[in-house]
């Protein structure tokens, strides 16, 4: 009664095994071909490297530059990426880009249109590395394409930022849903001063993630011209946005007037108290020391730890902590004082 | 009457296997699509900018060490050279009886410090804490023996950073594995609370000073079969499950967790042998109980190399232990099974782990016994036996062969063509010897459970990073 089932199952097992065997053969051949191709690319890199280098350094052209097949193009792409990472001179960089434009533009354009996600991604990475500004229209096309993967959108926005594309602020405001603040920060940090200022002007229109990224970036840039902006954010927002503003201020190390920030040390939210401790430490004003010593006795470990670190930023921080160690009744505060005093010794 | 029972029983086994095979087929398909997407992606480039990211979250790497004198120095050395902007390494000596602690102290010039430790999870008492005089981000905690989970908890208490990674003392990380496994966490603004990478087998690879020089294949058939088994488990099972946030296991050998969430979940549980799975189940539970949209993900690429047992004795102990651990987690959280409150975890993951992973070996063992008996009975029973055997071939060998091919099709970690062919043909033999062996050991694990045996079973280490 089972003859049929056994027959069908046996047959399907045989068919599947056969199929797998075929796939194995295909993969073995593919691996062999790839090994061979890799060897050829490596050989090509050997010959191309000195030629491209001579061109970039001295402007010498050679007839070998005729990159007529994909192996040569791939080799050229790898050589250029390597050079691009190490070149510093303006003239050399210009020549490298000129070379890339002349020889590889079509190659990259084709890759950007590939059906395979990984090839499109690799093309985007290379366009960024080589600063392939001639391909900006294609990158822009990718960035506003609706049915594009998340990674491609992030990468194309990053390239456009690096190219200082003028429409980038609008793209960030209206075309960057679902991007995390980390990703947005990465993009924004590439913008020049002009574009960044434009973004600040539009701050109130941004979604929360973008707001966070803008404040963070302002802090990381450490420029006094953003002080007014960050302080106004602190004054008119609350929650996470306000916290980020305090963080940015402590990164700047300046405030116009400390009074509005003093109330943070009594906040119900431990994060605000921790940020207060961070800010006080970066300001290093003598009159803030008592507040920091208070915060060293806080009920939250994070606040105590930050207070300890901030106290150590003062020139006489170690002595202050020694006093806590000798006199405080709070064993947690004493432990924390000890830890930060000794961190200095090792770290 | 007996005849009917035997036939009914065989039919039950056959139906069970068909169900399992269908489930695996679906998961295989999901994995195929996921892996193929990333084929040929130049991964090194995609992680570049995270190195300069001033907002990259610092990570505490916790290395529990119990009698690891053979490999601990090299393991730490390999960790010190990882590509990541900011991290600390905390080696927790869990009352080793050998020279683990002396080796660490002399080799890394460890000096005793008096640090403030915030006790957030209960642990056995900590004797001393050391910091390296030459490498300020290297710490050593010396504590009383309390098992791996307890050591990890002590590490969590001491750690300074918001994310921690648990790492076995005998494993070697690829240099950029950290960046890759942290990427989902960094990119997601905290939506991802745990992330884990692939584990590959180091036996047979060339390793020097904690760095993988050459990926190779071991000679021992037992190790080769484990390599295949790991490929299958990671490439097929985890990618498929992770895609829909159904992952119940984040390997204890290499995973990054949000410290806050782990502490809220109560840290690692010490009285179980499967503390890693237990933790992940509790995290899922917490996510659901708090009604938050958090994720636990698996990233197929970052690779952590670890040593596996080369002899039957140790492999058998390991498998018995794993199976007991699996049961303990499932039993502790049995309420989640088919509980609408826990969504797909309750309706897919739990039943899958109960039926396929836990009870599967019993059904399979009965299947093997049936096959042997029916050889003597002949007739219709023999036909059933052939049916069951064919199904188990599909289930064991064919899926493993597919996993080997999937690896070569997408990730391609084995450089030699001969390795690929060898793996393929070894996986062909799985149903004939390796599968029955592991099934038998897992059933032994169930038997130990029934008897109430709770031993851990010591493992012997050669030290992978000689």
Image (cartoon, coloured by chain):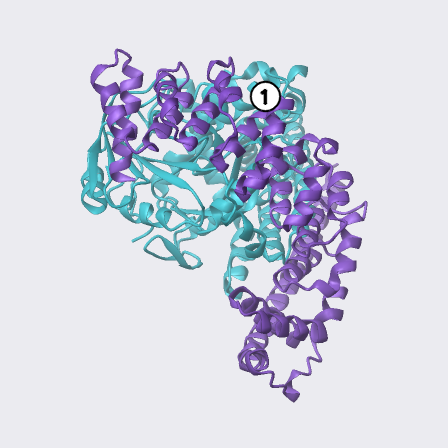
Using a 10 Å C-alpha cutoff, classify the residue at mark 1 as few (fewer than 14 neighbours), some (14 to 19) or many (20 or more): some
Residue B329 x/y as whole percent: 49, 22
Residue B312 x/y as whole percent: 37, 42
Q: Nearer the viewer, residue A149 or A240?
A: A240
Picture colour for chain B: cyan
In the image, residue A233 above or below residue B460: above
In the image, residue B160 above or below residue B173: above
Q: Is residue A292 visible?
A: yes
Residue bearing mark 1: B287
Picture colour for chain A: purple
Q: Is residue A324 left or right of residue A262?
A: left
Q: Residue drawn 18% across and 40% down?
A: B102
Q: Residue furthest front?
A: A256
Residue B33 x/y as whole percent: 70, 47
Q: Residue furthest bottom?
A: A63
Q: Residue drawn 53% across and 81% down?
A: A50
């Amino acid at each position: 009664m089972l003859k049929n089932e056994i027959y069908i199952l046996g047959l399907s097992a045989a068919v599947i095994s056969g199929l797998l065997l075929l796939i194995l053969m295909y993969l073995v051949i593919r691996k062999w071909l790839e090994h061979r191709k890799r060897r050829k690319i490596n050989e090509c890199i050997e010959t191309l490297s000195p030629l491209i280098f001579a061109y970039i350094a001295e402007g010498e052209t050679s007839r070998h530059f005729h990159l007529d097949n994909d192996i040569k193009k791939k080799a050229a792409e790898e050589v250029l990426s390597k050079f691009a990472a190490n070149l510093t001179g303006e003239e050399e960089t210009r020549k490298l880009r000129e070379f890339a434009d002349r020889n590889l533009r079509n190659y990259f354009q084709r890759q950007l249109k590939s059906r395979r996600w990984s090839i499109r991604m690799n093309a985007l990475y290379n366009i960024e590395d080589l600063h392939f500004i001639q391909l900006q229209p294609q990158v822009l096309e990718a960035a506003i394409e609706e049915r594009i993967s998340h990674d491609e959108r992030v990468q194309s926005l990053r390239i456009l930022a690096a190219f200082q594309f003028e429409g980038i602020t609008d793209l960030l405001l209206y075309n960057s849903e679902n991007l995390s603040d980390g990703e947005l920060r990465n993009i924004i940090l590439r913008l020049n001063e002009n574009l960044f200022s434009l973004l600040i002007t539009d701050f109130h229109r941004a979604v929360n993630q973008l707001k966070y990224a803008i404040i963070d970036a302002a802090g990381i840039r450490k420029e006094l011209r953003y002080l007014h902006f960050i302080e106004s954010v602190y004054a008119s927002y609350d929650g996470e946005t306000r916290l980020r503003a305090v963080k940015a201020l402590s990164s700047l190390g300046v405030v116009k007037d400390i009074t509005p920030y003093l109330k943070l040390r009594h906040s119900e939210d431990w994060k605000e108290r921790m940020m207060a401790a961070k800010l006080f430490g970066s300001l290093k004003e003598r009159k803030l020391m008592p507040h920091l010593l208070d915060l060293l006795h806080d009920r939250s470990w994070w606040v105590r730890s930050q207070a300890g670190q901030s106290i150590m930023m003062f020139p006489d921080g170690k002595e202050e902590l020694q006093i806590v160690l000798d006199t405080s009744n709070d064993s947690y505060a004493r432990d924390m004082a000890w830890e930060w005093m000794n961190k200095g010794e090792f770290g | 009457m007996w005849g009917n029972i035997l036939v009914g029983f065989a039919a039950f086994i056959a139906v069970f296997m068909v169900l399992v095979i269908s489930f695996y087929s679906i998961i295989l398909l999901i994995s195929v699509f996921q892996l193929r997407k990333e084929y040929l992606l130049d991964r090194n480039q995609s992680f570049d900018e995270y190195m300069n990211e001033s907002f990259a979250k610092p990570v505490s790497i916790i290395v529990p060490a119990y009698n690891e004198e053979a490999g601990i120095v090299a393991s730490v050395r390999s960790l010190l050279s990882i590509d990541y902007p900011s991290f600390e390494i905390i080696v927790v000596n869990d009352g080793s009886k050998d020279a683990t602690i002396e080796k660490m102290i002399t080799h890394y010039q460890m000096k005793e410090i008096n640090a403030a430790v915030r006790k957030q999870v209960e642990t056995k008492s900590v004797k001393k804490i050391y910091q390296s005089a030459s490498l300020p981000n290297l710490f050593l905690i010396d504590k009383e023996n309390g098992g791996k989970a307890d050591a990890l908890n002590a590490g969590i208490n001491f750690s300074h950073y918001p994310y921690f990674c648990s790492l076995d003392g005998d494993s070697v990380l690829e240099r950029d594995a950290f960046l890759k496994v942290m990427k989902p966490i960094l990119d997601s603004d905290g939506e991802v609370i745990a992330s884990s990478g692939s584990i590959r087998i180091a036996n047979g690879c060339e390793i020097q000073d904690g760095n993988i020089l050459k990926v190779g294949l071991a000679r021992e058939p037992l190790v080769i079969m484990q390599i295949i088994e790991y490929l299958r488990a990671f490439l097929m099972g985890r990618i498929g499950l992770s895609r829909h946030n159904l992952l119940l296991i984040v390997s204890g050998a290499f995973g990054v967790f949000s410290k806050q969430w782990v502490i809220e979940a109560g840290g690692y549980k010490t009285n179980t042998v499967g503390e890693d799975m237990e933790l992940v189940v509790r995290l899922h539970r917490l996510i659901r109980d708090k009604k938050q949209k958090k994720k636990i993900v698996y990233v197929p690429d970052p690779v952590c190399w670890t040593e596996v047992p080369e002899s039957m004795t140790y492999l058998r102990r390991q498998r018995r232990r794993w199976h007991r651990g699996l049961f303990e987690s499932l039993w502790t959280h049995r309420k989640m099974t088919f509980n609408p409150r826990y969504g797909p975890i309750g309706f897919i993951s739990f039943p899958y782990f109960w039926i396929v992973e836990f009870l599967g070996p019993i059904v399979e063992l009965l299947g093997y016994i049936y096959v042997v008996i029916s050889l003597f009975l002949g007739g219709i029973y023999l036909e059933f036996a052939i049916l069951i055997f064919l199904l188990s071939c599909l289930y064991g060998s064919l899926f493993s062969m597919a996993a080997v091919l999937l690896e070569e099709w997408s990730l391609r970690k084995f450089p030699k063509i001969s390795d690929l062919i060898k793996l393929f043909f070894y996986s062909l033999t799985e149903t004939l010897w390796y599968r029955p062996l592991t099934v038998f050991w897992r059933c032994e694990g169930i038997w130990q459970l029934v008897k109430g045996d709770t031993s851990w079973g010591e493992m012997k280490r050669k030290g992978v990073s000689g």
